[in-house]
Structures are given as C-alpha cells and as structure tokens.
Image (cartoon, grey):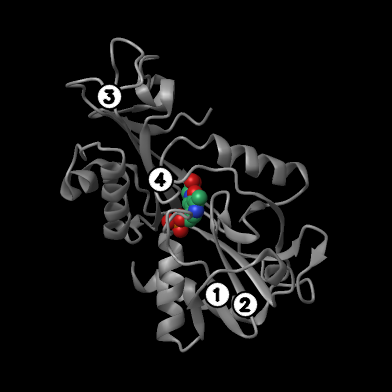
C-alpha cells in the first residue's frame, strides 16, 4: 500500500495509521459527503466552486460544514505536490455514534478525512474509449455528492466487465450522466449536455467546458439527449475532475462517427489544457 500522508480529524499521518471507528456513520450507513478537487502543479483547480458544491451537498443532508474555506485550504495544502497532477479527495461523515440508529444522533462531531492521489488524465488524441449504456438505477438526489455510491459502483463494474471505461446511465430513454462523469454529445454540430437537475451531479468540469464553449463561440446547448440520438451523435465525451474529457468512440455495439476522437473534442481538449495552465 502507498503509505502516503493523509489528513484525519486534525492530524496528518501515514495512510496505514489512519483509522476510524466501526461506529462511524460513514461506515455503517454511507452517511457522508465527499469532494474530488484536481490539483495541477500544486494549485487547486476551481477550489471555490468545489467548496460551493460541498456546502450544497452538506446542507442537503443537514450536516454543518465543520470548516470554513480558509480552514479547508489550510487542511488541504500539505497534501499538494508542486511536481504532480493530483486529485484531492475529502470526505465528511456525520461522525461516530454510540449505537446504530438510522435517525441522526445528537451532538456528535463529524469525521473529516482527506488524501491526495496522482492523476493521469486521458490524453491519447488518436484513440478513444468505449462506454456501455445501462439503466440508471440510482436514487433521486444525484445532485448530492454523497459517499453512498453503491449504485454507481455496480453500474461502473458492469461497464468494466464489458471492457468499457464508463457506464452511460439512461432514465426513461434519456441519458443522465456517466457512473462518475458528466456526458456531452455533438449532434448536428451543436455540443449538448443534459441540464442540471436532481438527476445529475453538477460537475465542475462540465461548467468549465460550457464556459470555454461560450468564450470560443462553440455552439452549445443544455438539453436532454435520448439514447437513440446519442447512438448517432457525431461525438460523445465524458467529463470529470480525474479523467478530464474522455472521447467515447464506441457505445455498446455502435461505433461513433469514424471511431476516432472527433474534431470538436480535439479543439476542446486543447482549449481545456490551456485553460488549466492559465489558472496556475
Ligand atoms: N466523480 N457525475 C458523477 C456521478 C460523478 O461522480 C462525477 C465526478 C461527475 C463529474 O464531476 P466533476 O467534473 O466535478 O469531477 C459527474 C468524481 C471524480 C469521483 O467520484 O471520483
């Protein structure tokens, strides 16, 4: 095991010494919230936006943020490495109760954990990835970044077992997002992504892509996408903080366009890399 230094409840310690109680509500119920923030060369990317989403997630589960933004910055900074691209994972659970009871315990202290991992986002301009469409079996609070990810991991696993990089989730004939990513399609030359709702996580990478599209006059729209329309799309991308923008070149048995990452992906990926550098 990589015995890196992690943060747990006020202490920095080697990963194999970071321990929580079996009575932690995160362990017993998945009663917690998380965030994943990319860090490029030691700089947190869109820290404020990730903190805002964290606040929204915490208030949805009626948990008070144990730290303000300055404190979070202080907690996360020692985990950053100026020589690496990293993802910073942070998690807050409702804390450790003395008995297992679904209802919230009174007066407990949240558990706070953070760690960093190196990332190597998708950057192969010549070949893309495959995706599998599956029924979206998740709950109705998909806008909340909850640690309760059983449905997402089962869906991702189905995709992995079919040799695919990601599962594309479908509800009532329309795509929502990936198991751990947002979705974009290029249809009739327009970049389309489903609108924000309780059915998707409001991805920070998604917002950046829309901002870049706006600034560069790339036509885009936030609209619903049917699975049928997706199968005949010119391009499909999946986006996240850890993988950036993955071009999908095969969906189920359909080859997308000519089976290569498309021209709008090439342009967007270059603009995205430049955008990242401009924020260091
Ligand atoms: N997941 N949708 C879901 C369900 C996700 O889990 C994620 C990210 C996204 C993309 O959001 P963002 O662009 O802010 O990373 C969309 C993270 C990376 C994870 O669970 O590890």
Distance Cα–Cα, label 3 vs label 1: 40 Å
| Residue at the disc numbered 1 | 192
Question: Image quadrant of residue 42?
Answer: bottom left
Q: Position of residue 197 (x, y in %)?
A: 42, 59
Q: First in sequence, mark 3 or 2: give its number.
A: 3
**What distance separates the C-alpha of mark 2 from that of mark 4?**
27 Å
Q: Return the residue at label 3.
A: 104
Q: Say if mark 2 contacts mark 4, CB within 8 Å.
A: no
Earlier-in-chain disc, 2 versus 4 = 4
Query: In this figure, which residue is indicated by the disc labeled 4?
Result: 145
Distance from Cα at disc 4 to Cα at disc 3: 19 Å
Under tag 1, what secondary structure? strand
Image quadrant assignment for residue 113: top left
Q: Is mark 4 within 8 Å of ligand 1?
A: yes
Q: Nearer the viewer, mark 3 or mark 2?
A: 3
- Is residue 241 visible in the rendered image? The answer is no
Q: How many marks can you see?
A: 4
Frontmost residue, 177 versus 2: 177
Left or right, 217 with reference to 44: right
Pointer 1 with pointer 2, Cβ within 8 A? yes
Q: Return the residue found at the far bottom.
A: 217
Question: Which mark sits nearer the N-terminus, 1 or 2?
Answer: 2
Residue pictured at 39% horizontal, 20% vertical: 17
Q: Are marks 3 and 2 in contact (CB under 8 Å)?
A: no
Residue 186 disc label: 2
């Amino acid at each position: 095991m990589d015995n890196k230094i992690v943060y747990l409840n006020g202490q920095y310690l080697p990963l194999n010494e970071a321990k929580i109680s079996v009575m932690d509500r995160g362990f017993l119920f998945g009663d917690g919230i998380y965030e994943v923030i990319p860090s490029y060369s030691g700089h947190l990317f869109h820290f404020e936006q990730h903190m805002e989403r964290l606040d929204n997630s915490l208030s949805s589960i009626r948990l008070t943020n144990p730290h303000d933004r300055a404190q979070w910055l202080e907690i996360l900074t020692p985990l950053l490495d100026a020589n690496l691209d990293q993802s910073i994972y942070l998690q807050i659970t409702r804390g450790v109760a003395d008995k297992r009871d679904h209802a919230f315990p009174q007066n407990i202290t949240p558990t706070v954990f953070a760690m960093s991992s190196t990332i190597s986002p998708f950057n192969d301009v010549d070949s893309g990835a495959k995706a599998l469409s599956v029924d979206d079996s998740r709950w109705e609070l998909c806008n909340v970044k909850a640690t309760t990810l059983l449905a997402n991991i089962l869906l991702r696993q189905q995709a992995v077992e079919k040799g695919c990089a990601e599962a594309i989730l479908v509800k009532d004939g329309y795509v929502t997002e990936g198991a751990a990513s947002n979705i974009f399609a290029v249809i009739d030359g327009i970049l389309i992504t489903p609108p924000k709702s309780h059915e998707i996580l409001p991805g920070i990478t998604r917002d950046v892509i829309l901002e870049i599209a706006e600034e560069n006059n790339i036509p885009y729209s936030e609209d619903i996408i049917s699975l049928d329309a997706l199968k005949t799309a010119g391009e499909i991308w999946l986006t996240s903080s850890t993988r950036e923008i993955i071009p999908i070149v095969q969906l189920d048995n359909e080859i997308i366009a000519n089976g290569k990452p498309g021209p709008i992906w090439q342009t967007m990926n270059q603009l995205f890399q430049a955008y990242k550098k401009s924020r260091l």
